[in-house]
Amino acid sequence: MQKRKHRYDRNSIILCALVFFVITATAFCMIVDGREESARKREQEARQNQELEQSRAEEQADAKAEKERAEALSVRPGVPVGTLQPDINEKAVYLTFDDGPSENTQKILEILRKYDVKATFFITGFCEEYRPLIRQAYEEGHTIGLHTYSHKYEEVYASEEAYFADLEKVGKIAEEQIGFVPCFVRFPGGASNTISAKYNKGIMSQLTEKIQEKGYQYYDWNVDSGDGAGNSKEQIVAASATDQYSHAMILFHDGRSKEATAEALPQVIEYYKNLGYEFRAIDRESFAAHHAVLN
Ligand SMILES: [Zn+2]
């Protein structure tokens, strides 16, 4: 009897020990699992934080670069713009478009995107409905310059005051779209135009000086695509393609009715690409082609 009781006791002890062991082992496993789980969570959190910091740093770098780009392109009185003597060992081509925006601006932007080349748009107050294209062009890396608001020779060349009042108006359009007033200007008819003499003798001599004093620079051209005269696609290609200049500044138009310009553009781009020219949007350091002032 006594012996049997002992056996029961022993069995109970073994059973208890077994139960204890199972419970302990389970608890141990749960603790280990829990620790692994929280380690995994911590690792994941650290990774997410790192990614967040990285994207924040990238955003800040982008914003800084955007700000610097805007500053470099904006009008700052007293800070000179452009050079008249570019490095002749380089081969650069500046595609410049006047009189936009219009429906043709959209077509031209598509072509520039396709060929991955940058250009410059000298804008006007025309075609209000296409003004968002100014922002689009800027965001795609092109430069925005000012042509005039009204483009009416009799108005803008009537006096210095009239010219700058008009320039301020077109500058506001640019500012609305891209956030600043650019320092790049193209005179209607170029600095060499003589039509202005009909309205004011000597006005171009005054304006070409005054504009630089005010922190702008003006850009004429050394290659005329002839699209202003309503030339055909073939004529535009022929007139635009020349290896005569190390820095070619080509005059095009992206106003209404300039479909032939968009049609000619791919061939002009291919011509300069094949000759190894670099396509540049005008910036603060760019070559400023100046015509002789004749009025
Ligand atoms: Zn024009």
Image (cartoon, grey):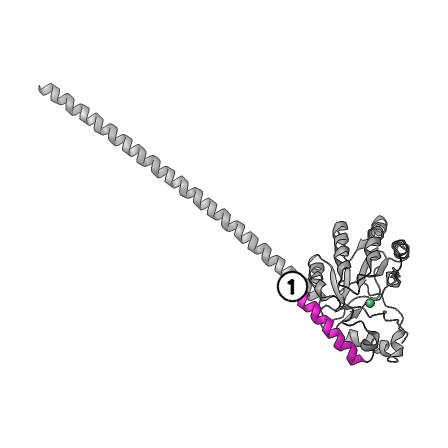
* Residue 265, percent from left and from top: 82, 54
Inspect the magenta stretch and tell me whether residue 166 lies in it.
yes
Mark 1 neighbour density, 10 Å: few (under 14) some (14–19) many (20 or more): few
Residue shown at the point (42%, 43%) measured from the top left: 39
Query: Mark 1 falls on what kind of element?
Result: helix
Inspect the magenta stretch and tell me whether residue 7 lies in it.
no
Q: Amino acid at mark 1?
A: Lys
> In the current view of this chain or complex, which residue is farthest to the left?
1
Instruction: Identify the image quadrant of residue 10.
Output: top left
Residue shown at the point (53%, 53%) measured from the top left: 53
Residue 20 appears in the rendering: yes
* Residue 28, percent from left and from top: 32, 36
Q: Does residue 244 appear left or right of residue 161 in this picture?
A: right
Task: Name the chief secondary structure element in magenta.
Answer: helix
Front in this rendered view, residue 129 or 253: 129
Q: Quadrant of ligand 1?
A: bottom right
Vertical arrangement, residue 223 with respect to residue 49, above or below = below
* Residue 23, percent from left and from top: 28, 33
Residue identified by numbered label 1: 67
Front in this rendered view, residue 92 or 128: 128
> From the image, which quarter does the N terminus lie in?
top left
* Residue 294, percent from left and from top: 91, 74
Residue shown at the point (73%, 74%) measured from the top left: 168
> From which residue to which does the magenta span run?
159-181
